[in-house]
Image (cartoon, rainbow, N blue to C red):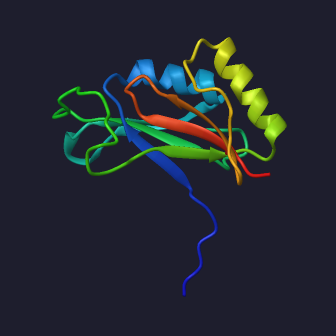
């Protein structure tokens, strides 16, 4: 079987590119590394990255977007989960979300993992998860 090593980036369609860029930069501590138009004038994008380029988030707008809020009940993306190395790091993310005023769940400790769930400005469910 061919090999893969990791997810390179995620891309999310948003309703307001500037607003979402600011939110993702603030929450994830990422910086804009690239931006431009889609081919055939079908929208624009901004690519954000952490300093070592190990995680990237693309934010996209499309002119035919009906500006509805995201719902995981429709076909497509359900949620995005970011793995963190430890429970203490999960606690640090929970504190950061609180400091930024981002509504989130408390840490939910399950048998195999612990998770904090939150949503972006367009209602996309995001989570931080640790194992062990």
Locate residue 111, reporting x and y percent: 71, 51
Q: Farthest residue in the bottom direction?
A: 1
Q: Is residue 88 left or right of residue 107?
A: right
Q: Quadrant of the N terminus?
A: bottom right
Q: Is residue 48 visible?
A: no
Is 41 in front, or is 51? 51
Q: In the figure, 65 relative to 10: above or below?
A: above
Q: Could you tell me residue 117's position as x and y percent? A: 56, 33
Residue 51 in the image, given as x and y percentages of width and height: 71, 39
Q: Quadrant location of residue 3?
A: bottom right
Q: Is any part of residue 6 visible from this angle?
A: yes
Residue drawn at (66%, 16%), measured in percent from left and top? 98
Residue 23 lies, with reference to residue 46, above or below; the image says: above
State the image quarter where residue 17 is shown. Answer: top left
Tell me residue 44's x, y (percent). 32, 35
Closer-to-camera residue (28/102): 102
Which residue lies at the image location 54% right of the left edge and 18% below the top edge?
A: 103
93 left or right of 89 in image: left
């Amino acid at each position: 079987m061919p090999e893969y090593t990791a997810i390179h980036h995620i891309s999310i369609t948003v309703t307001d590119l500037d607003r979402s860029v600011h939110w993702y930069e603030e929450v994830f501590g990422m910086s804009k590394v690239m931006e431009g138009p889609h081919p055939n004038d079908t929208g624009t994008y901004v690519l954000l990255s952490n300093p070592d380029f190990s995680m990237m988030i693309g934010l996209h707008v499309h002119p035919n977007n009906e500006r509805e809020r995201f719902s995981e009940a429709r076909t497509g993306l359900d949620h995005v989960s970011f793995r963190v190395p430890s429970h203490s790091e999960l606690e640090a993310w929970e504190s950061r979300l609180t400091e930024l005023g981002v509504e989130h769940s408390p840490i939910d400790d399950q048998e195999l993992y612990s998770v904090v769930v939150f949503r972006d400005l367009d209602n996309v469910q995001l989570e931080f998860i640790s194992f062990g």
